[in-house]
Amino acid sequence: MEPFNRKNTVVLIFALSSREQIKHKCIPRGKLLFDKLNNHTLATVKKSGLPYQICSEHHQLGDTFGKRLSTAIQLLFDEGYKNVIAIGNDCPQLTVAHLSYTHEQLSIGNSVLGPTSDKGFYLVGIQKRYFLRAHFEALPWCGDTLLYHTLGYFKTLCAKAICLEELNDIDHVWDIKSVLQSPETFTSTLKNILVLILEQVSRNFFQPVANDFFSFLEIPFNKGSPNSPIYS
């Protein structure tokens, strides 16, 4: 047995392109944000040293999220991988340490979930022997009971599921506040983009009380400029 053979595990970056993602998430400067999040996620995965595949809307098959994700995972198992770590692109707090620890747990027989504050998850690590495609596909992917039911899925299979720390993903503009108030594990460039978005929200919707709004957020306020590197 080779418990830490990195060739046995692949990271599936299951994420829409920024152009497609802004159609589903109404966030100011969404393309700028998701371009940077895609780059940040890819850089993090590359640093882990694990094999990876990117599955955007151009490669996803199926008419529901569950079908598309399940199909992508199945194809990787069909390629010969023993373990799959599936992630999205909307959790800037994801680190190399999360991926490495997940790989280690998969290598000793455990499944892994990275829970989010909205009762979903930013990461799922699953072994081939615990992947029952039809059952996995049928999980309530669009509900607030996803984490609960996924833990139940693994329990039914007598698979030990390890939970990572709870992190925040970005589904709505207000999720940005939680991300910025959490320990920083991402670049200052990405942080500046997040602050810039909140500045725009404040200007558009809370202009009379902008100063109170940012005081409430309890984050450094940086206006940025058109020549700032965040536009690169």
Image: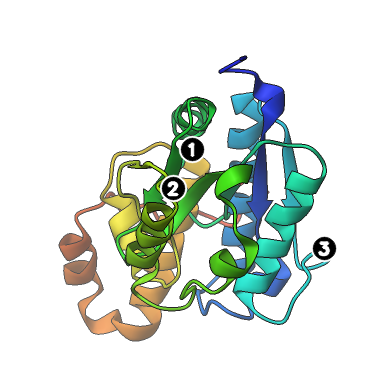
- Residue 14 x/y as whole percent: 65, 56
Q: Which one is nearer the viewer's eye here, 167 or 100? A: 100
Q: Secondary structure at mark 1?
A: loop
Say above or below: 44 vs 65: above
Residue plotted at (64% across, 62% down)? 133
Tell me where residue 30 appears, x and y as whole percent: 58, 69
Secondary structure under badge 3? loop
How far apart are labels 3 and 2 at the CA level?
30 Å
The mark that comes first in sequence, 3 or 1, is 3
Q: Is residue 232 above or below residue 28?
A: above
Give yes or no for contact between labels 3 and 2 (Cβ–Cβ under 8 Å): no
Under mark 3, the amino acid is His
**Residue at numbered disc 1:** 187
Q: Residue at x 59, y 26 (%)?
A: 48
Residue, disc 2: 191
Disc 2 element = helix
Callout in the foreground (3, 1):
3
Q: Name the amino acid type tagged 2.
A: Lys
The three-letter code of the residue at mark 1 reads: Thr
Q: Determine whether 214 is above or below 109 in the image.
A: below
Given the current orientation, which residue lies at the most extreme top position? 2
Determine whether, in the image, residue 91 is placed left or right of residue 45: left
x, y (%) of residue 107? 53, 26
